[in-house]
Amino acid sequence: MSSPRPTAALRFVLGDQLSPALSALRGADPAHDVILMTEVGEETTYVPHHKKKIAFILAAMRAFRRELEEKGFRVRYVALDDPDNTHSFTGELERAIAALKLERVIATLAGEHRVIAMQRSWADDFNIDVDIRDDDRFLCTHAEFARWAEGRKSLRMEYFYREMRQRTGLLMDGDQPEGGQWNYDKDNRKPAEPDLFMPRPQRFEPDAETKKVLALVNKRCASAFGDLEPFWFGVTRAQAEKARDHFLKHALPHFGDFQDAMLVGERFLYHSVLSLYLNVGLLEPLDLCRRAEREYKRGCAPLNAVEGFIRQIIGWREYVRGIYFREGESYISRNALGADRDLPEFYWTGETDMACVRACVTQTREEAYAHHIQRLMVTGNFALLAGIEPRQVHEWYLAVYADAFEWVEAPNTIGMALFADDGLLASKPYAASGAYIDRMSDYCRGCAYDVKAKEGERACPFNLLYWDFIARHERRFANNPRMAVIVKAWAKMDPGRRNRIRKEAKAYLDGLKPGSWRSP
Ligand code: FAD
Ligand code: DLZ
Ligand code: SF4
């Protein structure tokens, strides 16, 4: 006797869940089930998302709808300009349940606590059977991460990463790391020089549907942050794969050497610009790492590049996700250093005499992209040193980058950049003076400030604010083995000089104009 057919289900797919292997789609029956996808106003406005980010997500959702329909699935797709659109996930689910009369809902756990709370309320809200499945598009489950973290005094990424290498077998020679070392980061800190032959990320012409999305975003999200065009991101799986292959062939070989470098005229250097595709499900992380490993095995990319790239994905990406879910909803409210200054207006306008910040914000406004060191050591470092309130910084990062989803953005901002989780993620704050930026970039050459000046009218603000930060947190960091030398150097500094630095830092901070996003 055959087992009875399970009741027909409504399968709810969110904008960052565009994977055919998604748990919510597993076992889907094209004849009876309906897939729900919704473009909703609430998601486009709960932080002032960049126009390119909104357009990317909506266009990729529409492409995924086509992919599903080509496989014979029935998709209930609600567009942003549908006059009946309630503009919330819960409102759209309610409408779909009423219209389709299906008996159960299947979803994949969202990547943000705010949305998870909505998902968890649906069973009671609608008195319906709701099956929320784990998001297993990652290598490490929440339970596995919790087991790894259990009983450890500190949760250092490096040890997590080694276990992930062993587990996946990536770059392993038996039970030893390929080449004898786990980590080749020390080879990866070279400054770069402008190079006419530097590869650029793969760009795509918007197709007809993407053009419709661009017109829609232009009309409905005109007041959102950032430049919508030129819009060159891929939005289909095939395009994301083309961008991947382009990176593996042209940029991966130098990815390691110049990973930390910054150049005014080269916004992408040898970075992959693949995070947006990975984060919405157009690329699969393990597959990407295996392809990178193959480049090493074929002799097309050196070990330091491939190890560095794989570490970002099976190490950092999985690790920050583990932290986000382990620490729970309150993580985004952490503020261990008591930072309470408002976000300066120049985070939105780019209008500042600091050439480094201006370059990173301008690039962010135009591209919805900045690479890791720009995010960490320029805009993140400034926010840390100036004592900007973590919540405001977090909302800025979540809004302005096309790849920003809370599970990955929040630990990078709250933990890595701002030390607001009191060292859970980083053993010391990533605080640096102007000398670091000067060493790793060409920004200082075109700056109104003098990076060598430690005080006085033309002193680089990063220099003043660095010492001011150390002074403000002297007691806290005196016992941190990685900060003690710096704290001692401050204590030994001539008192007259210390006073001048603090006074100038205060004047600088008092002069910062706060500003939230306002459409121009
Ligand atoms: P590459 O340099 O080419 O790296 C390869 C891949 O490794 C990336 O595509 C990404 O998937 C992964 N990766 C690299 N570093 C990290 C990291 N620290 N955490 C997680 N994954 C990493 N990354 C996001 O995907 N979304 C975010 O919202 C985000 N916010 C950040 C906020 C701050 C304050 C900082 C310091 C970092 C943030 N990152 C975020 C991490 C990192 O900056 C981006 O992943 C990277 O810049 C994306 O560009 P890429 O694809 O060219 O990366
Ligand atoms: C970020 C975003 C935006 C801008 N718009 C939508 C949307 O219209 N529909 C949708 O399903 N998802 C969108 N998203 C992504 C969601 O906010 C995302 O699923 C949550 O942030 C959970 O990670
Ligand atoms: Fe930035 Fe200071 Fe260099 Fe100017 S001098 S670009 S403010 S680090």
Image (cartoon, helix red, strand yellow):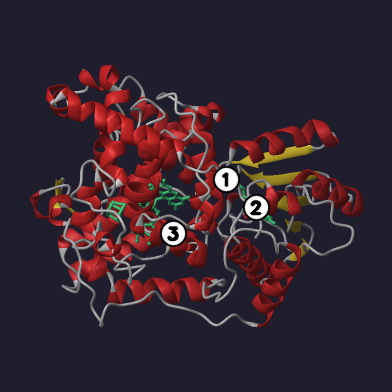
Where residue 233 sits: x, y (%)?
A: 52, 72
What number is the disc on residue 475?
none
Q: Is there a contact, CB below 8 Å, between mark 3 and mark 1?
A: no
Q: Residue at x 52, y 57 (%)?
A: 349
Mark 1 and ligand 3: say if the CB distance to the nearest ligand atom is below 8 Å: no
> Disc 3 marks which residue?
275
* Residue 104 or residue 204, whichever sits in front: 204
> Is label 3 within 8 A of ligand 1 (CB to nearest ligand atom)?
yes
Badge 2 crowding class, 10 Å Cα cut-off, few under 14, some 14 to 19, many 20 or more, is few
Give the CA separation, mark 2 to mark 3.
27 Å
Q: Please state the horizontal and vertical placement of residue 66, each as a whole percent of the image.
A: 68, 72
Residue 171 seen in the current view: no
Residue type at mark 2 is Arg
Between residues 414 and 1, which one lies in front from this camera angle? Answer: 414
**N-term mark: 3 or 1:** 3
Report the number of discs.
3
Picture quadrant of residue 29: bottom right
Given the image, on which type of amino acid does mark 1 rest? Answer: Gly
Tag 2 residue: 518
Image location (x, y in percent) of residue 219: 75, 68
Quadrant of the rendered structure where residue 300 is?
A: bottom left
* Residue found 50% across the figure and 48% down from its top: 397
